[in-house]
Amino acid sequence: MKLVGVRLNDNGKIYYFDDNELDLVISDKVIVETEKGLQYGIVICFVSDDNMDKHLEYKKVIRIVTKADEKKHLSNLKDASKALVKCNNLVKRYGLNMKIIDASYTHDREQLIFRFISDERVDFRQLAKDLGAIYKTRIELRQVGIRDKAKEIGGIGPCGRKLCCNSFLSEFDSVSINMAKNQNLSLNPSKINGVCGRLLCCLTYENDNYFEYKKGIPNVGAKVSGDFGEGKVMSIDIFKKNYKVLLDTGEVITIDLNDSKK
């Protein structure tokens, strides 16, 4: 068995499937078996034997997309687009505090999935009932976060580049305010929040390196002592591996950890 990574929608999460001994290449369009039924996807990557979890059971790639599959997929996209408009009209009619951001059919049309964002818990039972009656298939209404909305819409981040979530991130990592503190960043929301209003995803990229560089360096404000006497740490430079100390005598000295290793 060989594993392939397949993306089921643009910029979406990558899921892994048994290649079913098919002769696949990157960018092949395939039909895969999922818990929701058959779905259309694109081969993004291959998984080496070393990175494969042999204890898991993986669903299979059913086939490479045929002309009939492609035609059906395009029809599904068109019908899902119409369903999105209809669903939003029903949301307005019922006065529900939710925003439907997209709609999609599984390839076999066994399920019609609507994703929405909302700041509160929404009772959408009547909405789901009406949608089921209209489209004669199983309806799923799935609440997603504001970061997912930014991923769908895209935009330019404060760095001047295309949003990471819209260009290459397939999954969202947990981001905490401690990451900003660890990197000595200003805690001004306009500096550390993305266009979605949540903490910047890129705070996770170098966080482990900051932890590594900070080893052996005291925090600003810490009391320290040594051959130089006693004092208080005024500032640190984790990349140069040094820190400045205000001695009790009033003198300011620089402690270079690189010198102590020689």
Image (cartoon, helix red, strand yellow):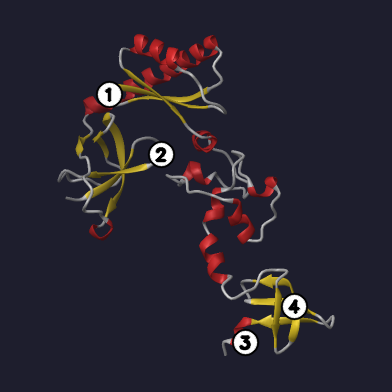
Which secondary structure lies at badge 2? loop
Q: CA distance from mark 3 to mark 2?
A: 49 Å
Secondary element under disc 1, as helix, strand or loop, is: helix
- Distance from disc 3 to disc 4, alpha carbons, whole Å, reads 16 Å
At 15% from the left and 46% from the top, the residue drawn is: 21
Q: Is residue 82 visible?
A: no
- Mark 1 or 4, which is nearer the eye? 4
Q: Which numbered disc, 3 or 4, marks the residue closer to the eye?
A: 4
- Where is residue 225? Give x, y as percent: 70, 82
Q: Earlier in the sequence, mark 2 or mark 1?
A: 2
| Label whose residue precedes the other's in the sequence (4 or 2) | 2
Amino acid under label 1?
Lys
101 over 92 or under it: above or below = below
Q: Which residue is mark 4?
A: 245
- Disc 4 residue type? Val
* Residue at position x 57%, y 90% in the image: 262
Give the vertical position of 198 relative to 103 (above or below): below
Q: Is residue 238 left or right of residue 100?
A: right
- The one nearer the camera, 143 or 226, is 226
Residue 71 bears which disc, if any?
Answer: 1
**Quarter where residue 82 is shown:** top left
